[in-house]
Image (cartoon, grey):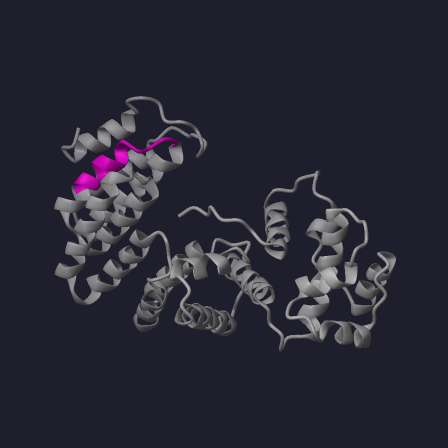
C-alpha cells in the first residue's frame, strides 16, 4: 500500500521529524523537528513573545475561545503581518502545542490526528505497554468515519480527508493493526475492525485478504475461494508485496495448487536480494509447516549457502538460487 495524498501542516512537520529521526538531514532546521511536548509552558510563551505574539495561559484561552481549531487561532494571531511561510509555521507549531495542552475538550481533526500519529509511532516502535489508549483512538476514528458518512459524505472522501491530517499512512496502519490482532488471537476485534473500515479504504484487496485469514479459521473452503479471487485480481496489477502476503496466508492453510503458481508469479517480480530472501523464507515456512522435510531441507540449504549480499543488491539474470528453487518445485 502506498500513500499518494496531500498532507496538512501539522502532519507535515510530524512527518519531517519522523523521517529525520530515521535519517538525519542537515538541511532540516532545528525548529522543524523539535519535540515541543518537552518544553515548559513558560518556554513556549517566551518563544512566541520573541515572534511578537504576547500571550499567557489566560489570554491564550481568551483568544482561542471563538476559534474551532489551532489553525484558525494562528491565522487570527498572525493577522496581516508580513512574515515568511516558515515563520508562520513556527508560530503555528507553538500555538498548536498550547492548544493540545490547554484545550483537550476542543479536539479538532488536526489535534486528534496528531495524538493518533504519536500513538502509532509508539506502537510501531514497540514502546506501548498498554494499548488501551490506541484502541480508544481507533474507536474514535471509526465513529468519526461513520458520523461523517451518515451526513451524506462519500466514504472514500471522508477517509482521505482524515488521512491527510496524519504523517503515518492511515490505511497501512489499520491493515497492520488488524493483522496484529489476528496474530494475537483477538479474532472478534479484528473482524469488527474489518467490518468498520472496509467501506472506506481504497486498496480493498488487502482488507479482503484479512477477511480470508479470518475465514481460514472457521471456513477453510470459503477462505480458499476468496484467495482464488484475490489471486485472479493480482494478475491484472502485479504487486510483489501482495503476492507475498497471499503466500503467507497459504502457509497457514496449505494448498499446493495455489501456492506453487504464486511462487512462479513472485519469481518474475523479484528485483533485489531482499525479495529473493523473503521468497525463500516463505517457501521454507510453507514446507516446514506441512512436515515435508525433504523439500524444506533443500530450501533451507539454498538459504544457508547463499553468498553474502546486501539486501538492496539487484538480482542478476538467471540467479542460480532462484533457478534451483524453481527446479526443486518443478516450476523451472
Q: Which residues are magenta?
A: 260-272
Frontmost residue, 6 versus 276 = 6
Q: Is residue 38 visible?
A: no
Q: Is residue 214 above or below residue 249?
A: below
Instruction: Pick the quarter of the image with the C terminus.
Output: top left
Q: Look at the image and say whether residue 301 sits in the magenta stretch.
A: no
Residue placed furthest toward the top: 317
Residue at x 40% of width, y 27% of height: 314
Measured as percent of width and height from the top left, residue 188 is found at: 31, 73
Q: From the viewer's perspective, is 99 left or right of 174?
A: right
Q: From the viewer's perspective, is 162 left or right of 209?
A: right
For residue 277, what is the image quadrant? top left
Measured as percent of width and height from the top left, residue 219 is found at: 16, 65
Measured as percent of width and height from the top left, residue 179 is found at: 35, 60
Q: Is residue 130 above or below residue 245?
A: below
Identify the main secondary structure in magenta. Answer: helix
Q: Is residue 61 visible?
A: yes
Frontmost residue, 167 versus 64 = 64
Q: Look at the image and say whether residue 263 sits in the magenta stretch.
A: yes
Q: Is residue 201 above or below residue 232?
A: below
Amino acid at each position: 500500500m502506498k500513500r499518494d495524498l496531500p498532507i496538512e501542516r501539522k502532519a507535515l512537520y510530524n512527518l519531517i521529524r519522523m523521517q529525520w529521526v530515521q535519517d538525519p538531514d542537515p538541511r532540516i532546521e532545528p525548529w522543524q523537528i523539535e519535540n515541543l511536548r518537552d518544553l515548559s509552558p513558560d518556554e513556549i510563551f517566551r518563544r512566541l513573545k520573541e515572534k511578537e505574539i504576547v500571550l499567557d495561559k489566560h489570554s491564550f484561552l481568551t483568544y482561542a475561545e471563538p476559534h474551532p481549531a489551532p489553525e484558525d487561532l494562528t491565522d487570527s494571531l498572525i493577522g496581516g503581518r508580513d512574515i515568511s511561510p516558515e515563520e508562520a509555521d513556527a508560530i503555528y507549531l507553538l500555538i498548536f502545542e498550547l492548544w493540545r495542552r490547554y484545550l483537550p475538550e476542543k479536539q479538532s481533526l488536526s489535534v486528534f490526528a496528531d495524538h493518533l500519529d504519536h500513538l502509532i509511532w509508539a506502537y510501531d516502535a514497540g514502546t506501548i505497554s498498554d494499548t488501551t489508549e490506541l484502541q480508544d483512538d481507533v474507536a474514535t476514528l471509526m465513529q468519526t468515519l461513520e458520523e461523517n458518512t451518515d451526513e451524506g459524505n462519500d466514504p472514500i472522501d471522508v477517509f482521505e480527508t482524515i488521512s491527510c491530517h496524519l504523517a503515518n499512512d492511515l490505511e497501512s496502519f489499520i491493515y497492520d493493526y488488524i493483522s496484529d490482532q489476528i496474530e494475537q488471537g483477538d479474532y472478534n476485534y479484528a473482524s469488527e475492525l474489518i467490518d468498520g473500515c472496509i467501506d472506506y479504504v481504497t486498496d480493498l484487496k488487502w482488507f479482503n485478504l484479512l477477511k480470508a485469514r479470518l475465514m481460514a479459521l472457521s471456513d477453510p473452503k470459503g477462505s480458499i475461494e476468496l484467495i482464488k479471487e484475490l489471486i485472479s485480481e493480482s494478475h491484472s496489477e502485479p504487486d510483489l508485496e501482495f503476492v507475498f502476503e497471499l503466500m503467507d496466508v497459504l502457509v497457514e492453510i496449505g494448498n499446493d495448487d495455489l501456492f506453487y503458481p504464486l511462487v512462479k508469479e513472485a519469481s518474475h517480480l523479484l528485483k533485489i536480494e531482499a525479495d529473493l530472501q523473503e521468497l525463500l523464507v516463505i517457501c521454507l515456512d510453507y514446507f516446514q509447516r506441512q512436515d515435508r522435510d525433504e523439500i524444506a531441507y533443500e530450501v533451507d540449504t539454498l538459504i544457508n549457502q547463499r553468498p553474502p549480499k546486501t539486501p538492496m543488491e539487484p538480482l542478476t539474470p538467471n540467479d542460480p538460487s532462484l533457478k534451483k528453487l524453481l527446479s526443486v518445485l518443478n516450476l523451472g
